[in-house]
Amino acid sequence: MRKNMKLPAIALGAILGLQISHSSSAVAGEVPLTLFENSFAGRTYHHALLRLSPDLLSEEAGKVDPEIGYRFAEGGLFEIYVKSHVFGRAALHCSQVKIRMPWTSPSAEDGARKVERKKALFERIEAMREKKSGRVELVLELDPYLSFQSAENYKLTQCIAFFRTAFGGYVDHTNPIAVPPH
C-alpha cells in the first residue's frame, strides 16, 4: 500500500514550517522535500523525495564525520549533510541533518554493481557541491528515527535520515518495493 502525502507545495511548506523566500531554494511555491508512505512485508515506511541543491548542503565545522562525511567509503558508505530547515519543524532541534548511505555487504546479490550505482550518485552530488550549481533528486528513508502521527505531525527523533535502500542497493524512486531492485 502506498500513501502519497504529496501536498500542494505551498501547503506542504506551511505544514513543514519551511520559510519560502526568494533567497532560498524553496521559491515560487517549490519546496525541496515531499513525503511518501509505503508498506512492505506488513511494515510502513516513510520516504522523502529531496530536490537537493548546493544551498541546502551544510558543512558545519566539527560536525562532519572525517571518515565518511562527503567521502566515499568501502561498501558504498557515505554521508552528506543538509541544513535543518529542509525538514522544517520536524528538525527544529537539529543544527543540520546527516543523510547516510548504508553500507552494502560484499556478499549481497550483485553487490559490486550496487556499490557502483552508489558511487555514481555520490559523484553527482559531489560535482553539484563543487560547482555550486545544479540539482540532484534523492530518495530518503526517514525511519527508524521518525516519530510520525500524520503529514502535519511528525518529528525526526535524531538528526539523521538515510538514503532509501533495499536488498543492499540504493532505491531511486518512491514507489513500493516488491522484489529486489535490478
Image (cartoon, rainbow, N blue to C red):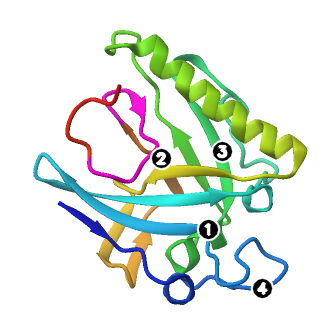
The amino acid type found where label 2 is placed reads Phe
- Secondary structure, mark 1, is loop
Residue at the spot x=30%, y=63% of the render? Answer: 37
Mark 4 or mark 2: whose residue is earlier in sequence: 4
Q: Which residue is mark 2?
A: 162
Give the side of residue 62 with respect to residue 100, left or right. Answer: right
- As drawn, the residue found furthest toward the left would be 42
Mark 4 or mark 3: whose residue is earlier in sequence: 4
x then y, percent, for residue 154: 39, 76
Q: Which residue is mark 1?
A: 32
- Secondary structure, mark 3, is strand
Q: Which residues are magenta?
A: 166-176
Mark 2 or mark 1: whose residue is earlier in sequence: 1
Q: Are marks 4 and 3 in contact (CB under 8 Å)?
A: no
- How far apart, in angstroms, are the residues tagged by discs 2 and 1? 16 Å
Residue 120 falls in image quadrant: top right
Camera-side residue: 71 or 166? 166
Whether 36 is drawn above or below 26: the answer is above
Residue at the spot x=35%, y=55% of the render? Answer: 143
Q: Are marks 4 and 2 in contact (CB under 8 Å)?
A: no
- As drawn, the residue found furthest toward the right would be 131
Mark 3 or mark 1: whose residue is earlier in sequence: 1
Whether 81 is drawn above or below 180: the answer is below
Q: Is residue 39 visible?
A: yes
Q: Which residue is mark 3?
A: 80
Q: Is residue 70 visible?
A: no
Q: Are marks 3 and 2 in contact (CB under 8 Å)?
A: no
Callout 1: few (<14), some (14-19), or many (20+) C-alpha neighbours within 10 Å? Answer: many
x then y, percent, for residue 73: 62, 21
Callout 2: few (<14), some (14-19), or many (20+) C-alpha neighbours within 10 Å? Answer: many
Any mark on residue 160, and which?
Answer: none
Any mark on residue 21, and which?
Answer: 4
